Amino acid sequence: MTVTDIAIMGVGKIARDAHIPSIEKHPGFRLAATVSSSGGVEGVENHATLDDLLAAREDIPAIALCMPPQSRYEAARTALAAGRHVMLEKPPGATVAEVQALDRLATERNLTLFATWHSRYAQAVEPARAWLARRTARRARITWQEDVRNWHPGQAWIWKAGGVGVFDPGINALSILTEILPVPVRVGAAELEFPENCETPITARLELKGDGGLSVLANFDWNHEDPPTWDIEVETDDGTLRLSKGGSEMYVDGAPQDVGDTGEYDALYARFSSLLDTGARDVDLSPLVHVADAFMLGRRKIVAPFHD
Amino acid sequence: MTVTDIAIMGVGKIARDAHIPSIEKHPGFRLAATVSSSGGVEGVENHATLDDLLAAREDIPAIALCMPPQSRYEAARTALAAGRHVMLEKPPGATVAEVQALDRLATERNLTLFATWHSRYAQAVEPARAWLARRTARRARITWQEDVRNWHPGQAWIWKAGGVGVFDPGINALSILTEILPVPVRVGAAELEFPENCETPITARLELKGDGGLSVLANFDWNHEDPPTWDIEVETDDGTLRLSKGGSEMYVDGAPQDVGDTGEYDALYARFSSLLDTGARDVDLSPLVHVADAFMLGRRKIVAPFHD
């Protein structure tokens, strides 16, 4: 197997907890460098800026962008313009239009662009998709509740405009929903609660609809005492499916199903490796479109200030 | 020339002021029926519901949907499912996802779907596009100000979630901008002012960016004493272009340009006629994507209540 040198830009929690271990485990990748202004990873060459990396290491063909979404576009554009393949952490950008622009650029340059949705690689998601493909979904309910204080301690960017607030975890649920349902959905109504000292919502309730009378209720709550709940339940004409723990467990009419035990980011890097092998792109914007649509047509409610 | 029977659904101000006169003027169309629960147009067959029309008049191949965007999806889907060609007033829907779904359905059924942006047919827009195509745009400024009390008197739907507020006129500017600029743009920052008794914004300021350093400032203001201003100014490496009065007048370095005098809706129905002739679709979502993006990353500010 060819080994692809890869660089990571943005060495925060998600890079350390998920990307770096999966890169080290995958025989097709070698972590060749990092880009971080605040120091990288022990034993790995670090560059303070992306431009420094691109100038110093023309031999590194692939870059994973793991910084907050607000600054992802410029970095992705710079990397693609320099001829590098790019992986984007979720959400793939701060706007729909900017990811569409990156997709066009990658297409023009014939480079791989992988807009990842890591939750789609949770082990029960593919079995759930296969199970639903043979049935008619009538109703679904998403319950995505966690205590932001425990899961995003001190991450100020999530409360700034462009950081999407509770949709940061909620978009994981939407990425699973859009993967497993056999029909497309659209947001029909939404209500978003904004803490009066924040620019992004702390809770969101969405009603989504699909053709054929499918109705989905989603409840995203960042102000919920742990333990967290990350569940999706789908009622069909032939039984009820439940995905639990963010897509890692699957139940049919209450009975647990055998779904294997591959880790999300291991599967995600396996996918990136296969995209690189075939020169393909994987850019599905539907989860981000649903979030933008929810902001556009949602009712806004101002609630009590949030303090970390 | 074959004459196409067309029906209009939603007989409000825009239908009476614009659609019906242009249909009557165009030799390729005949207004065969209307759909309105509150009465139609004198001398034209009216049906109370779309289902009534579809059942009674299988011979009408094309339907123009002129009602507010919140209910447009269901009607468009029903009409397409019944094998009719569809024209959508702007904005083409309440969400990006629903128009994408309509586009897929029209493609599957091999029907014409025309998501119109009437301002793109203002007489100076095509000359402006041609002028800019040979130059490099550096900076642009959109000034779109009007008194909503005069232009949308008593239209309650514009203040309800899903009605997009000041983006209802503002999206006209965005539809022109995205038509005339030779490079795509994306929203980089936005600030939206919501009256405390309304679900939609009354003013919006957007910063858009395009590759190559292009920067666009857009100022949408619905709380501005008339006379209105609907101007777009673009500074290039070779002169400054100004579109005035919603795209009907064009100036280069202050000098007025000859741009003809075709009316917007006359040109729009000419376009629909040619799409029907060739069985083509015309669905460009970029103006709506920019609005959704502005809602998603915009800062919200609550301002004084609005009273009509």
Image (cartoon, coloured by chain):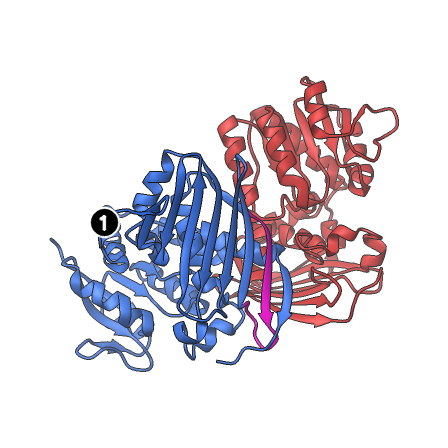
Chain colours: A blue, B red
Please report the bounds of the magenta region as a residue range. A187-201
Report the chain holding disc 1: A
Q: Position of residue A295 (x, y in %)?
A: 58, 59
- Local SS, label 1: helix
Can residue A192 be found in the magenta stretch?
Answer: yes
Q: Quadrant of residue B135?
A: bottom right
Quarter containing the C terminus of chain B: bottom right
Q: For residue B293, say whether it is visible.
A: yes
Which x, y percent locates residue B306?
80, 64
At x 67%, y 18%, the residue is: B58
Residue at 27% across, 72% down: A16
Counting from the top left corner in percent of width and height, residue B136 is at 53, 59
Residue A48's place in the image compared with A21, above or below, is below
Task: Tell me which residue sits at (43%, 49%) in the image.
Answer: A233
Q: Is residue B201 left or right of residue B186?
A: right
User: In screen coordinates, is B128 left or right of A290?
Assistant: right
**B298 or A202: nearer the viewer:** A202
Magenta part mainly helix, strand or loop? Answer: strand
| Neighbourhood count class around disc 1 (C-alpha, 10 Å): few under 14, some 14–19, many 20 upward | few
Residue nearer the viewer, A291 or B193: A291
What residue is disc 1 on?
A274
Residue B34 position in % (x across, y down):
77, 29
Residue at (53% x, 36% y) in the render:
A211
